[in-house]
């Protein structure tokens, strides 16, 4: 069964009375060259357990299963398991879990399904919840080696942006704190059905053994980062003061104590800068 063939997809949809859902951000891969490239980018072989998020009709799932030791595919759409039962028939190393990934205890799931195996995440993510899924995977410090996902090109560039550069934002800082990201390749809109209005890209996040900077309280550190980027047009001093409910004078002093100009813009701050400001704020309280 060639799942990238448009006729096959339409036949399956008709057979199971399945209509693609905009609500679930469903865009199925119809370019047969894309799934192998994604799996190559993730570095998957027989040693690995692979967590897939949003398998759709199983196009990427089948490619992963052909190379991995085991695949656990988490799908939220209750209409898809019967379709997947047909498209993944004969693959004894695949398990479909019908759950919302954002509400799933992934640590427990991995411990149960991938005992003794190195684990990677590999997925064609729904565009509308890319950041929440990525942040859940990172913040829960799951035992995964890398996260290789296809997302909107713009989102991939934001995920991989270097803090301290114009393209960076709060999510860029969070990703760099936990991982080393790189954009692997782009995928044109015509590679999907239905074709989205944007170009996609595959980004790989290699999880760091320890965070990029050491801070005493990650929650406070990320609250500071979010505050800084909460009002992009303001200086870091004004944005942080507004976001954390502090006086501008207090924040400006902390920036100076960290060796920074109080007029600095949020996107000019590196992870080390944020750590220094966090330390200065703590010392001044």
Image (tube, rainbow, N blue to C red):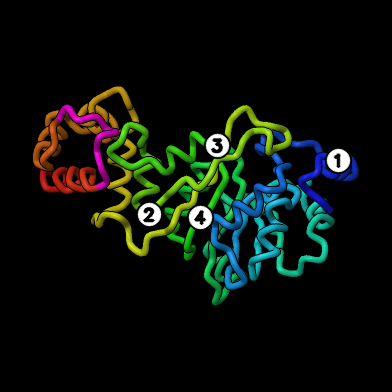
Find numbered disc 3 in the image and state the secondary structure of the residue it sits on.
Answer: strand
Is residue 10 toward the left or the right of residue 141 in the image?
A: right
The magenta segment is: 262-271
Circles 4, 3 touching at the beta carbon (< 8 Å): no
Q: Nearer the viewer, mark 4 or mark 1?
A: 1
Distance (Cα) linking label 2 and label 1:
42 Å
Which residue is labeled 1 in the image? 7
Between 204 and 174, the one lying in front of the other is 204
Distance (Cα) linking label 4 and label 3:
15 Å
Marker count (numbered): 4
Q: Position of residue 230 (x, y in %)?
A: 34, 31
Q: Which mark is residue 147?
A: 4
Q: Earlier in the sequence, mark 4 or mark 3?
A: 4
Which residue is labeled 3 in the image? 152
Residue at x-position 55% and y-position 70%: 111
285 inside magenta stretch = no
Residue at x-position 24% and y-position 54%: 215
Is residue 284 toward the left or the right of residue 204 in the image?
A: left
Q: Earlier in the sequence, mark 1 or mark 3?
A: 1
Q: Is residue 271 visible?
A: yes
Figure check: 254 above or below 88: above
Q: Main secondary structure of the magenta part?
A: loop
Circles 1, 3 touching at the beta carbon (< 8 Å): no
């Amino acid at each position: 069964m060639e799942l990238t063939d448009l006729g096959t997809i339409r036949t399956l949809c008709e057979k199971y009375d399945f209509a693609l859902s905009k609500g679930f951000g469903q865009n199925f891969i119809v370019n047969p060259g894309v799934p192998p490239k994604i799996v190559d980018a993730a570095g998957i072989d027989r040693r690995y357990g692979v967590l897939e998020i949003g398998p759709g009709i199983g196009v990427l799932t089948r490619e992963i299963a052909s190379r991995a030791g085991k695949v656990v595919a988490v799908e939220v759409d209750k209409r898809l398991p019967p379709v997947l039962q047909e498209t993944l028939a004969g693959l004894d190393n695949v398990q479909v879990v019908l759950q919302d990934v954002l509400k799933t205890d992934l640590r427990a799931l991995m411990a149960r399904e991938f005992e003794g195996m190195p684990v990677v995440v590999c997925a064609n993510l729904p565009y509308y919840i890319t950041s929440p899924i990525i942040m859940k995977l990172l913040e829960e410090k799951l035992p995964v080696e890398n996260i290789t996902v296809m997302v909107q090109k713009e989102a991939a560039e934001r995920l991989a942006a270097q803090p301290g550069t114009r393209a960076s934002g709060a999510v860029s800082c969070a990703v760099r704190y936990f991982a080393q990201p790189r954009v692997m390749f782009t995928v044109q809109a015509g590679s999907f059905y239905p074709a989205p209005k944007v170009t996609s890209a595959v980004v790989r996040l290699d999880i760091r053994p320890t965070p990029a900077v050491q801070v005493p309280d990650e929650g406070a550190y990320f609250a500071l980062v979010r505050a800084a980027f909460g009002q992009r047009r303001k200086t870091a001093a004004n944005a942080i003061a507004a976001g954390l409910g502090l006086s501008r004078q207090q924040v400006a002093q902390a920036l100076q104590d960290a060796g920074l100009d109080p007029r600095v813009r949020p996107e000019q701050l590196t992870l080390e800068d944020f750590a220094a400001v966090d330390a200065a704020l703590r010392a001044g309280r």
